[in-house]
Amino acid sequence: MAGNEFDLINHYFKTQPVSRKDVALGIGDDAAVISVPENSQLVVTTDSLVAGNHFLADADPVKVAHKALASNLSDLAAMGAIPAWCSLALTLPSPDEAWLKGFCEGFYKLAEYYNVQLVGGDTTKGPLSITITMQGFIPEGKAIRRDGASAGDWLYVSGNLGDSAAGLDVILKGNQPSNELEETLLNRHYYSTPRVLAGQALREVASAALDISDGLVADLKHILKASGVSAVINADTLPLSDELIAFAGSKEKAAHIALCSGEEYELCFTVPESHRGALDAALAHTNTPVTCIGQIRHGEGLQVLWEEQPVDWKLSGWDHFSE
C-alpha cells in the first residue's frame, strides 16, 4: 500500500468541503498548524473503531464513517466544547477505492454539518480500523466535567435510549432487515445525532455530564465515582421510542435494553435544583429533547427502580461485537 498512500491521500482527503480560517497549515505537511481562539482551552479526544468489534467488515462505509466521526463529536459535546478540527488514521487491508469513496461521503457530510476540518492523519496496511482524533475549544474554565455532581442534583438524558442496541441486534442476525421497523433501528445504530449544541447550552446549567457510549448504567457509574455520590434511576421514566417498545415486546423489556445499550451518543447529565428552571430555556434553540430519569444522592452505588420498586435485572455494559 505504501506506493499508493500519497495518491490515496491526495485523491480522497486533500479535497474536502470544510476550510476553516483558523487552520494555517492542514493536510500535506508533517503536522498541522492551527490557531486556537483567545481565552479558550483546547479539548482533545480520540476514538478507534475496529472491524469485527465496532462494526462488521462488510458494513456500508458511508454508515461506518458517520458512526466513527459521531463518536468523537459526542465526546466533545459532553464537555460542552465546539468541535473544529480532526485527524484520521486509517488501516486498510488493501487500497479499496470503492470503500474509501463511500467512507469519505459519510465522513465529509457529517464534518461539513459541524464545520470540522480534516487537518491530517495517516494510512497504512493492516486489519480494517479507523482512529479519529478530534480537537475543539471551549471558553476557559467552562468545560463540563464528570466530577461535579452533588446529592440532590437531578439526573437527565437526551433523546431516546435503546435503539442502538436493537439496531445492533438486527445487524448481528446476518441478514438484511426484514421489515421497516428493523430498518429504522439499524439506521439509528449507525446514524446517531451528536448533541453538540445541547452540550454547549448545558455549560451554565449542568453540574456534570458524559456521553452514553458504553450504556447508561455503565457510564453513569463514572460520574458517580468521580463525584463521590450515588444515584437512583426510575427505569419506567426512561425515554423509549415506539420502535424499540415494538421490537422488545413490552415497555419493561425495552427499558432493560435502554439501561444497557451503548453507542447511543446521547448525553447523560446532572442539574442542580437551583438550575432546573433554566434548563428548558437553555436548550430551547437546540431542538434536543431531554428527560429527567432520577436523582443524585449521598453515598455510593446505583439503584434502579421500576414503578418505585427495586429491580433484579441483570444490567451490564456495552460489549460491541465481542462474543
Image (cartoon, rainbow, N blue to C red):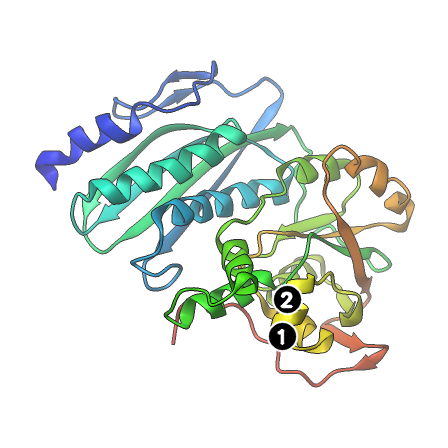
Query: Percent position (x, y) of residue 71?
Result: 50, 48
Residue 241 falls left or right of residue 173: right
Disc 2: CA contacts within 10 A as few (<14), some (14-19) or many (>=20): many
Residue 302 falls left or right of residue 29: right
Query: Percent position (x, y) of residue 280?
Result: 84, 41
Query: Which numbered circle lies on residue 127?
Result: none
For badge 1, the amino acid type reads Ala
Decide which of 5, 66 is in the foreground and name it.
66
- The secondary element bearing badge 1 is classed as helix
Quadrant where the image shows the N terminus: top left
Query: Percent position (x, y) of residue 134?
Result: 46, 37
Quadrant where the image shows the C terminus: bottom left
Place residue 124 in its image quadrant.
top left
CB contact under 8 Å: marks 2 and 1: yes
Query: Percent position (x, y) of residue 230?
Result: 76, 67
Q: What residue is rendered at 73% in x and 60% in y?
A: 239
Place residue 225 in its image quadrant.
bottom right
Q: What residue is rendered at 32% in x and 23% in y?
A: 15
Residue 198 falls left or right of residue 32: right
Place residue 11 in its image quadrant.
top left
Q: Is residue 214 shown to the viewer in this render?
A: no
List the residue tagged with mark 2. Answer: 244
- The secondary element bearing badge 2 is classed as helix
70 w.r.t. 172: above or below = above
202 w.r.t. 216: above or below = above
List the residue tagged with mark 1. Answer: 248
- Residue ranking furthest to the left: 3
Decide which of 171, 84 is in the foreground and name it.
171
Q: What residue is rendered at 59% in x and 64% in y?
A: 215
For badge 2, the amino acid type reads Leu
Decide which of 24, 10 is in the foreground and name it.
10
Q: Marks 2 and 1, how far apart in space?
A: 6 Å
